[in-house]
Image: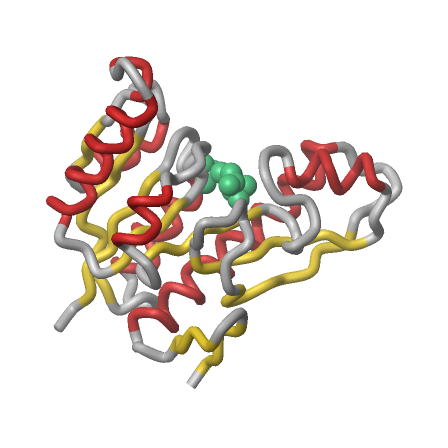
């Protein structure tokens, strides 16, 4: 059965575009069935429209509390009937109930070599720290902040003249390759979570 992927994104959505392209050209054996966004101004919505992919805006600002937002998000996710949820530039921490409900079925892309530089602005943290290599990480989501079992990582050099933006641009190119690759492995049922490790069959 063809796997169904739903994407959560808050902004630009270039990784979402990468998922659309990879599912359509056969690199990922799945269909991208929905975009969910917390941001009514997200450019990802334009990408969904252009690709004819249904989208749902769960506008964080319109809810009286974080709990109310999370409940609405949970119902939206359930309604997707997706095998896999991809956090692709989704800029909020996912609540514990959602993480538990979709355990082993949520994947995040992070612009640093975890466990270094979790949280926001991974690229800025790398430049400020002065590391010589950074990169990107695709991992399963658990209840920790960017701490779930790692599927794929890619190193990217940090150059002397780099600032946050130039490093982010270099890392992004690799994100666009790593995320579809991880999704392909998931959709081919080749990922086995074994404690902290993800084994690739
Ligand atoms: C990416 O760098 C991603 O790793 C991070 O946020 C950025 C989103 O970019 N979580 P885009 O919206 O996919 O273009």
Between 147 and 21, the one nearer to me in the picture: 147
Q: Position of residue 10 (x, y in %)?
A: 39, 31
Q: Position of residue 36 (x, y in %)?
A: 26, 36
Displayed quadrant of residue 126 = top right
Displayed quadrant of residue 147 = bottom right
- Residue 198 higher or lower than 7, as above or below: below
Taking 35 as reference, is 163 left or right? right
Numbered disc total: 0
Q: Residue, x 33% and y 40% (percent of image)?
A: 8
Q: Position of residue 166 (x, y in %)?
A: 71, 36
Taking 72 as reference, is 122 left or right? right
Q: Residue, x 59% and y 34% (percent of image)?
A: 120
Q: Residue, x 37% and y 79% (percent of image)?
A: 190
Q: Residue, x 37% and y 64% (percent of image)?
A: 183
Q: Position of residue 64 (x, y in %)?
A: 27, 13
Displayed quadrant of residue 79 = top left
- Residue 59 higher or lower than 111, as above or below: above
Residue closest to the far bottom: 201
**Image quarter (top left, top right, bottom left or bottom right) of the C terminus:** bottom left
- Residue 12 higher or lower than 20, as above or below: above
- Residue 47 higher or lower than 117, as above or below: above
How are the residues colored?
Answer: secondary structure
**Image quarter (top left, top right, bottom left or bottom right) of the N terminus:** bottom left
């Amino acid at each position: 059965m063809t796997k169904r992927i739903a994407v959560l994104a808050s902004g630009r959505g270039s990784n979402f575009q990468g998922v659309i392209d990879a599912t359509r050209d056969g690199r990922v054996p799945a269909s991208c069935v929905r975009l969910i966004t917390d941001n009514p101004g997200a450019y990802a919505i334009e990408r969904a429209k252009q690709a004819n992919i249904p989208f749902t805006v769960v506008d964080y600002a319109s809810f009286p509390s974080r709990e109310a937002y999370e409940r609405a998000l949970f119902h939206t996710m359930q309604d997707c009937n997706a095998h896999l949820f991809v956090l692709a530039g989704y800029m909020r921490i996912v609540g514990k109930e959602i993480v538990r409900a979709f355990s082993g079925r949520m994947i995040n892309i992070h612009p640093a070599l975890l466990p270094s530089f979790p949280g926001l602005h991974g690229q800025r943290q790398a430049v400020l720290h002065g590391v010589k290599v950074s990169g990107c990480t695709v991992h399963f989501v658990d209840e920790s902040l960017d701490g779930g079992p790692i599927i794929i990582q890619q190193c990217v050099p940090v150059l002397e003249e780099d600032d946050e933006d130039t490093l982010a641009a270099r890392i992004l190119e690799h994100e666009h390759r790593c995320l579809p690759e991880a999704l392909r492995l998931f959709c081919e049922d080749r990922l086995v979570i074994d404690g902290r490790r993800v084994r690739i069959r």
